[in-house]
Image (tube, grey):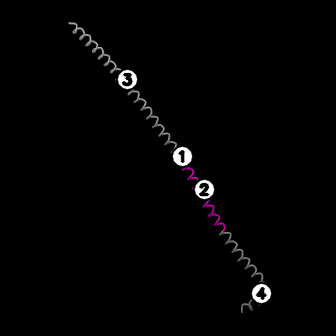
Amino acid sequence: MTSLFEEVSGSIAFKAAYEKCKAELAAAEADLALSTQKKRSVAAGEAEARMEQDKLETYQEQCEQLVKLETRLNLFKLYQCEHKIDSSKEEAEKLKERVDKNVQSKVLENNYLLEKGRQCVNVKNSLAKY
């Protein structure tokens, strides 16, 4: 019945062109779907690349911050070592002064005792004469 209607209306002459256009439309829709899919995958790839770039930049910033903090820590440790060295030098000087005073005191005591010993010997010798 459809074919009879197409013959009577004269649309059968346009059937081949219609089928051709219909096939081109299907092909164009398939190409559009493929292009859309490619566009989405490229956009997803770009987004992933941006995320990776951001992660890389964050990692590099954290590495730089770590280096700065380690440098700062090492400088602080160096400061502490220098402070301990200075404190130790001061303490050593104080101890040396005390030792020098003690040595000087012992020398004076020994000289005093030697002098007293000589005086005792002189007194004994004087007493021995009598």
Stretch in magenta: 38-63
Q: Looking at the image, which residue sits at the far right?
A: 13
Q: Is residue 8 left or right of residue 116?
A: right
Q: Which circle marks residue 67 in the picture?
A: 1
Which one is earlier in the sequence, the residue at label 3 or at label 4? 4
Q: How dense is the environment of label 2, judged by Cα within 10 Å: few (below 14), some, or many (20 and up)?
A: few
The residue where tag 4 is placed is 12
Q: Label 2 to label 4, Cα distance in Å?
A: 61 Å
Q: Label 1 to label 3, Cα distance in Å?
A: 49 Å
Which one is earlier in the sequence, the residue at label 1 or at label 2? 2
Q: Is residue 105 above or below residue 5?
A: above
Q: Is residue 63 above or below residue 27?
A: above
Q: Quadrant of residue 101?
A: top left
Q: How dense is the environment of label 3, judged by Cα within 10 Å: few (below 14), some, or many (20 and up)?
A: few
Tell me whether the residue at label 2 lies in contact with that at label 4, contact meaning CB atoms closer than 8 angstroms. no
Quadrant placement of the C terminus:
top left
Tell me whether the residue at label 1 lies in contact with that at label 2, contact meaning CB atoms closer than 8 angstroms. no
User: Which x, y percent locates residue 41?
Assistant: 64, 66
Name the kind of residue labelled 2 in the image.
Answer: Gln
Q: Quadrant of residue 14?
A: bottom right
- Circle nearer the viewer, 3 or 4: 3
Q: Which circle marks residue 53 in the picture?
A: 2
Q: Looking at the image, which residue sits at the far front?
A: 129
Could you say which is closer to the camera, residue 83 or residue 14?
A: 83
Q: Is residue 45 left or right of residue 125?
A: right
The residue where tag 3 is placed is 100
Which one is earlier in the sequence, the residue at label 2 or at label 4? 4
- Circle nearer the viewer, 1 or 2: 1
Tell me whether the residue at label 1 lies in contact with that at label 3, contact meaning CB atoms closer than 8 angstroms. no
Q: Label 1 to label 2, Cα distance in Å?
A: 21 Å
